[in-house]
Amino acid sequence: MKAIFFADAHLSDKTEEELKYVLEFMDKVLFDADYVFILGDMFEFYHGYEGYIYEHFLPFAKKLKELSEKGKKIFFLEGNHEFSLGSFFESVTSSKSMLRLDMKLDSLRIYISHGHEMTPSFLNYLLRSKFMLKIMDLLGPRISWKLAMLASVFLSNKKKVYKGKTLKIFREYAERKLKEGFDVVILAHSHIPDRYEIVCGSTRKLYLNTGDIVRDSTYIEYTTETGFSLRKYP
């Protein structure tokens, strides 16, 4: 069995080259995967509308559908730039969307999420509130997109250079989850690729971070034979 995890492309209507790169990565790396886990912030902004997918994301959506038709099970863990992908997105891409996932791969219990829940903020709470989601619905996809792009100039940290403090915060959060009973914790969000072993009692447990699929070209691979590894797409 093989599973692939990747995240944080921050695709928009101005990232054609990045989109081509991501689609190439999906063709070359996911062809023999059984499970595909997308750990959020693949889009600079996305709110699910019934019957509508942003035109610049259609190639990505079609690629997910194509992979699903080849038998891959696809999970999309929403990041802090995705606001309720919705049933239409799921039907078009044949994927399942959620905020976090507790599941088993082989005999390992794994916690998977984008990772932004570790640093809750009023702004994040407000943007995900029922009231704000309703406002997005009323504004429609085009106006919501324009407002999101204006706001991203001030709010998006996709180009931020992260320091050792951030690495430490993510490892400490992962350690808390591992002590709750998980064998492996997999996160994204920090844009820092990481593989970190933690000893809990007599058991060695593992935290991994996908890093940034575009900037760092990093992703996580799991196979039954070799376990988890942090990899770099050439």
Image (cartoon, rainbow, N blue to C red):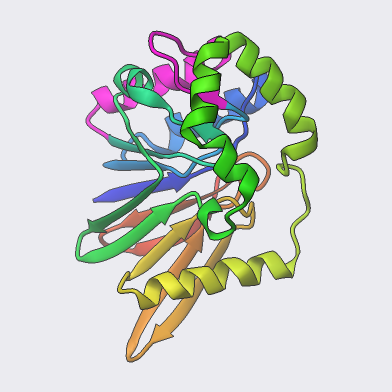
Q: Is residue 49 left or right of residue 103?
A: right
Residue 68 rendering spot, x and y as whole percentages:
28, 27
Task: Tell me which residue sits at (47%, 13%) in the image.
Answer: 53
Magenta-span inclusion, residue 233: no
Where's the C terminus, which quadrant? Answer: top right
Extreme residue in the front direction:
131
Query: Looking at the image, is 66 positioned above or below residue 4?
Result: above
Q: Is residue 66 left or right of residue 193?
A: left
Q: Is residue 116 left or right of residue 67?
A: right
Extreme residue in the bottom direction:
202
Query: Looking at the image, is 39 positioned above or below residue 144?
Result: below
Residue 222 rendering spot, x and y as whole percentages:
35, 56
Q: Quadrant of residue 75?
A: top left
Bounds of the magenta span? 46-72
- Marks counted in the figure total 0
Q: Quadrant of residue 28?
A: top left
Magenta-span inclusion, residue 70: yes
Task: Tell me which residue sits at (44%, 30%) in the image.
Answer: 84
Q: Nearer the viewer, residue 76 or 197?
A: 76
Q: Is residue 202 visible?
A: yes
Query: Looking at the image, is 87 positioned above or below residue 181?
Result: above
Q: Is residue 14 visible?
A: no
Residue 208 rendering spot, x and y as whole percentages:
48, 62
Q: Nearer the viewer, residue 202 or 2?
A: 202
Task: Tell me which residue sits at (58%, 39%) in the image.
Answer: 126
Task: Tell me which residue sits at (58%, 12%) in the image.
Answer: 139
Residue 81 rendering spot, x and y as whole percentages:
58, 35
